[in-house]
């Protein structure tokens, strides 16, 4: 390659091609098949319309020794399209961030979410942190167009933020 300089034309080597590496994201869904003799557990196309219905389905969480925070992704008719284990914590806390909750909700094209977490102590009374994270998640969901329908705490009984007027 020749370029013009103050001293006349000069031969210079051709520039090396640049390599640019970019990361791309691909949504990958995993379908889990559960083979069990319980046929009434999670029927396909079931509409979730009450906190007690969610409690009945996920009451097994009351036997867990660690806190689990789960987001149920729902379609426009309140049917579960995806179940996301957002966080597994310790005996009395789990770390939850709106980014982690809604990242997968957007990938599954959820219209709404129901949030569930357990209290291994059996006492389903919400803590101050439970109220704060519920408020943050509701605000984040409103901003991006994914409604938070309820936040249910599972213990020996259940506590529904919607039924108590907090959502």
Image (cartoon, rainbow, N blue to C red):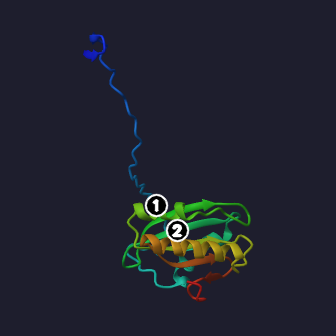
Residue beneath the point at 48% across and 72% down: 141
Query: Circle 1 sits in a helix, a strand or a loop, which is it?
Result: helix
> Could you tell me how many numbered marks the image carries?
2
Q: Is residue 8 above or below residue 123?
A: above
Quadrant of residue 154 within the rendered picture = bottom right
Where does the image place residue 160, in percent across and percent down from the top left?
59, 83
Q: Nearer the viewer, residue 15 or 73?
A: 15
Where does the image place residue 64, in percent across and percent down from the top left?
67, 66
Q: Nearer the viewer, residue 128 or 90?
A: 128
Where does the image place residue 65, in percent across and percent down from the top left?
71, 64
Q: Is residue 35 visible?
A: no
Could you tell me if the residues under marks 1 and 2 are in contact, i.e. CB atoms within 8 Å? yes
Quadrant of residue 44 within the rendered picture = bottom left
Q: Which quadrant of the rendered structure holds the C terminus?
A: bottom right
Q: Which quadrant of the rendered structure holds the N terminus?
A: top left
Q: Nearer the viewer, residue 15 or 64?
A: 15
Residue 162 vs residue 20: left or right? right
Give the Cα separation between the discs numbered 1 and 2.
9 Å
Residue at the limit of the structure toward the front, as seen here: 6
Q: Which mark is residue 71?
A: 2
Residue 116 vs residue 45: left or right? right
Q: Give the residue at mark 1.
A: 104
């Amino acid at each position: 390659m020749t370029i013009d300089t103050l001293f006349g034309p000069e031969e210079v080597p051709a520039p090396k091609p640049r390599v640019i590496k970019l990361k791309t994201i691909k949504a990958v869904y995993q379908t889990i098949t559960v083979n069990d003799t319980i046929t009434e557990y999670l029927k396909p196309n079931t509409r979730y319309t009450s906190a007690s219905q969610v409690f009945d389905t996920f009451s097994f969480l009351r036997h867990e020794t660690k806190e689990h925070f789960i987001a149920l992704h729902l379609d426009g008719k309140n049917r579960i399209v995806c179940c996301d284990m957002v966080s597994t914590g310790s005996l009395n806390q789990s770390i939850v961030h709106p980014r982690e909750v809604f990242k997968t909700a957007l990938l599954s094209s959820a219209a709404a979410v129901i949030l569930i977490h357990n209290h291994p102590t059996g006492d389903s009374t919400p803590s101050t942190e439970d109220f704060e994270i519920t408020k943050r998640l509701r605000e984040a969901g409103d901003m991006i167009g994914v409604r938070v329908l309820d936040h249910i705490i599972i213990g020996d009984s259940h506590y529904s933020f919607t039924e108590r007027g907090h959502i």
